[in-house]
Image (tube, helix red, strand yellow):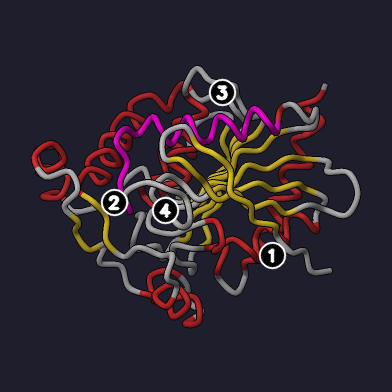
Amino acid sequence: MKVESTAQPRPHPVVGSQLVRRWDPVGQATVEVVLVHGIGEHSGRYERTGGLLAGEGFGVTAADLIGCGATGGKRAYVEQWAHFLDQVQVFVEEARAKAVPTVLMGHSMGGLISLEYALAKRPRPDLLVLSAPGLDGGAGWQKAIAPLLGRLVPRFKAPNTLKGEQLSRDPDVGEAYFADPLVHTASTVRLGAELFAAMERTRSTMMSLDVPTLVLHGGADSIVPPTATVELGNLPNVERRLYPTLRHEILNEPEGPEIVAAIAEWVRSQIAGVVS
């Protein structure tokens, strides 16, 4: 069964308008998923994942982040990292109001946003699913100069430098990525500075994570190194699954449907503990 998404603009207090996608299951959703995309991309790249999750009986909501896709704001720019957390909070609150378990799910930068959100004193999700969360990455020199450049020339853009083959073993994924007019292949130095600061901040506080969490990481990921999630995977309420041959976008690998099915199985296995 193919599930189509609906995409609607919604007002946003910071940037004026945001694009929100929704995948609805047939019948009543048993779980609500808030899905957060990565840097430079947009929620439309999750059509397959959203449809597969809806096919599992889950309702899925994903917004284009500030400055990304069809949401307003300077492209690949954020004034404050907390604005991302504010954006996610709206959808977590809406999901919680539906009185079914709420899952916050994020990929790469979206995984970092989701993890920091779960660590913050905000309305919490019941479960957390992180795909290659951006706890590390970037060159040492980039991390060193990003804070200064973020203050002096915040809107200056630098190439993201990633290559299509880093995303997936499926060459169509890389080709579609670079042909997508809503994908941004460069980021402002302000966004980079905020990203690196969030990495450091989250690594220093993640020991307090108390939300049951599933971490998924490709062993052949050359964007977010697999070592970045080892410490997270050692936490008592975290299960880490390493897929040795898969690359950064494991959900867009040929094995993506099987991985989504495994996510759904893990979520269902946790629900009894969540609602008891």
Q: CA distance from mark 3 to mark 1?
A: 27 Å
Q: CA distance from mark 4 to mark 1?
A: 28 Å
Image quadrant occupied by the N terminus: bottom right
The mark lying in front, picked from 4 and 1, is 4
Q: Earlier in the sequence, mark 4 or mark 3?
A: 4
Assign a secondary structure to mark 1: helix
What residue is pinned by disc 1? 258
Q: Which residue is mark 3?
A: 210
Instruction: Identify the secondary structure beneath mark 4.
Output: loop
The spot of residue 33 in percent (x, y) is 68, 43
- Residue depicted at 40% across the width and 32% down the height: 83
Residue 64, image x and y in percent? Answer: 50, 50
Q: CA distance from mark 2 to mark 4?
A: 20 Å
- Which residue is the site of mark 2? 137
Q: Circles 4 and 3: CB distance less than 8 Å?
A: no
Rendered-image quadrant of the C terminus: top right
- Write down the region rendered in magenta: 75-95
Local SS, label 2: loop
CA neighbours of label 1 inside 10 A, class few (<14), some (14 to 19), many (20+): few
Q: Which residue is mark 4?
A: 68
Mark 4 crowd level (few <14, some 14–19, many ≥20, 10 Å Cα): many
Q: Is 55 positioned to the left or the right of 176 in the image?
A: right
Q: What kind of secondary structure does the magenta stretch mostly adopt?
A: helix
Give the residue type at disc 2: Gly
